[in-house]
Amino acid sequence: MRIRLCLLAFALCTAPAAAQLELKVGRDALSWIDVQDSLAFVISSPDSVWTWRVDPGENLMANVAGRGGSILVSAQQPSFNPFGEAILTPVFLDEVTAVKFIGDGDLSTAFNPDDFGLDRQTSIYIDLGGAYSIERTRLSPRLDAEHVGSFPQTFDLGLGDRLRPVVTLMRLLTTNDVSFRRYLFFGITRPNIRAVVEWPGVLQVSGERQARYVRFQPIGDAPWELAELELYTDGTAPPGFYRSVPLLAGTGTPVWGRVRHEGGLPIEELPIVLQTRTGPDEDPLIYFITQGPQEVQVNRAVWEYADDFPGIAQGPVKSNPNWSGWETVDGNVVRSPSPNSYLQFQVRFLQPGVKLEQLVFEYFSPPSSGQMRAEISPNVVDAGAETEFAMSMQTRRLEGRSDTGYRFVEVLTSAEVAGVDSVKVDDELVLHTVRVESGRGFEVNLWKRVIADGSFLQVFFRAKVFVDGTRFEVRTAERRSTAEVAESDTVFQYAQEADVDLQLPSSGLTVRLSAQNAPLLDDVVPARQVLTPNGDGVNDVFEVAYSLLKLTQPAPVFFEIYDLGGRLVRRGYAGEDRSGRFARVWDGRDDYGALVGPGLYLYQVRVAADNETKCRTGVVNVVH
């Protein structure tokens, strides 16, 4: 689908000036509904997409209508089949609005099927307007002396097994799209004997379930009424999801840049995960139909209806190799490769009550290169060992342009970079400077712009990898000015991973550990095992170095000193660390600041992560 973009600025086509353009979705720009490919557990309108906020302990029935849900009563109505035979068909009775009394919070109002001449087995269907976790239920009739005895005695309260919205509520009645699982049941042999039913009770196990649709189905012919049906939530809901169609940039050579959220909190403050992928055409997936043994490539519309034609069936759906994989937006920057004319995005909503109004994707033209591919070698290393790496990148100049190129190259990684040894361009050593940023990677300034078509860049550096599957992202960084904005902006262009050096045994940008079952805590080494805390500057502190491996998020780490009787003498460090190499010291004092007596002491390094706790212990000799 080709989408019209809102182009905010135009600039000269000569370097270093560049045109900054914007692709907008929502709020008087592209409609969220028009560019929608798929969604789940979110509500969409032309201006915005959102998930409804619910609080722990909230009665979901109190705001059904506000969330776009409904409370309807169904009944069997006579109709005729094609043979003229009378049959009963279930329908919703929209005119029976009194059924909404069961969610109005007023115990003086109620719904009674007898008041409308309805069968006492008439069912009530509820659309909560979204899928939520239900942890507690309460139902009752009016509690005055006249009505308190009219409580439902036999009924089946069921929760629908479909969490996504149905096309129309009539599908709840006429198809098998939604089946209702029993949640609360009172039958003929075990009827309800209480006016107010609380579920779960004091001695019962919690009945928490997720549901969007609820059905109250009476059993038998006893009279009944409902004043209130209350469904309480723990405040959680299934994660919401929205995916766009591929969106076409207004220039054939866009360098995708930053992403902004207009009309609400910044992206980094929202509980969402925003991902993008880019490609040269509008088909990130390739669809096939089968006709006998033959597979034929078709578009998505033909594939969706293939089963409707005799002798034809839906075949496999494959990823388009010309499209990149999904990349998470980090630091408000699109990490997907450029220049690709099409961008597709998807958003995961991690909690209820999140709203997106306008997403703005910035892009520039021209790019640094028409094509940028990179790889890292070796791609299998020993955990925590300093390794010599080679990053290789090949670029192709944009056809018809001589004003492109790059001077800054960044390698982004969580690996511990020890240093950059040399840089080559087309097999020749070049002058360069390096800036290393701990925990983030490094930047190389080549001082001379690389502009030749087919240029081959190699950066040789040393680093330690502590986590299996560590990623090395490669991008160019160029400072550019626009005609409308006096300040320059940094334009990042990410390289696509590929096998660019046939002499290297790798083809990607991910590094694996040679021993994937490497220990969580390893290489615990004391600098020396004697401590003489006398202030002479020699052996005044005891130092222990250690490596944390495989941690994908911070984990609690403790460095402690014990005496030989197992009593804690000093807690030297207590904090959270990620994977890496660390060193902790002890100055020979206890927790009260007093020097300990001479003798043997035990040191312990302990880390707890992923339900696994690892300890390493050794001995230190204190001498006065």
Image (cartoon, rainbow, N blue to C red):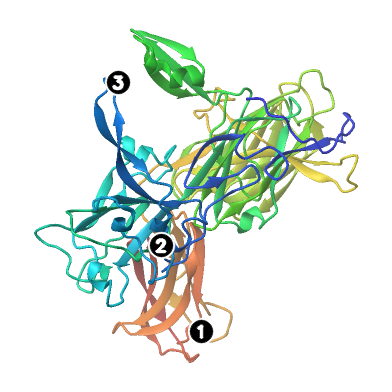
In front here: 70 or 466? 70
Residue 101's label in the rendered image is 2
- For residue 257, say whether it is visible: yes
Q: Quadrant of residue 227?
A: bottom left
Q: Amino acid under label 2?
A: Phe
Query: Which residue is located at x 72 percent, y 34 percent?
Result: 255
- For residue 235, say whether it is visible: no
Query: Which residue is located at x 53 percent, y 87 percent?
Result: 534
- Residue holding disc 1: 533
Closer to the N terminus: mark 1 or mark 2? 2
Closer to the N terminus: mark 3 or mark 2? 3
In front here: 155 or 44? 155
Label 2: how many residues lie within 10 Å, few (<14), some (14-19) or many (20+)? some
Q: Given this view, does label 3 or label 2 mark the residue nearer the observer?
A: 3
Q: What element carries label 2?
A: helix
Does the residue at mark 1 contact the one at mark 3 (Cβ under 8 Å)? no
Q: Amino acid under label 3?
A: Pro
Instruction: Give coordinates of residue 523: x percent, y percent.
Output: 41, 58
Label 1: how many residues lie within 10 Å, few (<14), some (14-19) or many (20+)? many
- Residue holding disc 3: 82
Instruction: Give coordinates of residue 478: x percent, y percent.
Output: 78, 40
As measured in the structure, the alpha-carbon distance from the residue carrying label 3 to the one carrying label 2 is 38 Å
- 53 over 83 or under it: above or below: below
Closer to the N terminus: mark 1 or mark 3? 3
Q: Is mark 3 on a helix, strand or loop?
A: loop
In the picture, measured across the screen, residue 372 lies left or right of residue 604, that is right
Query: Which residue is located at x 58 percent, y 80 percent?
Result: 537
As measured in the structure, the alpha-carbon distance from the residue carrying label 1 to the one carrying label 3 is 100 Å
Q: Given this view, does label 1 or label 3 mark the residue nearer the observer?
A: 3
In the picture, measured across the screen, residue 8 lies left or right of residue 537, that is right
Instruction: Give coordinates of residue 419: x percent, y percent.
Output: 63, 48
Q: Amino acid under label 1?
A: Pro
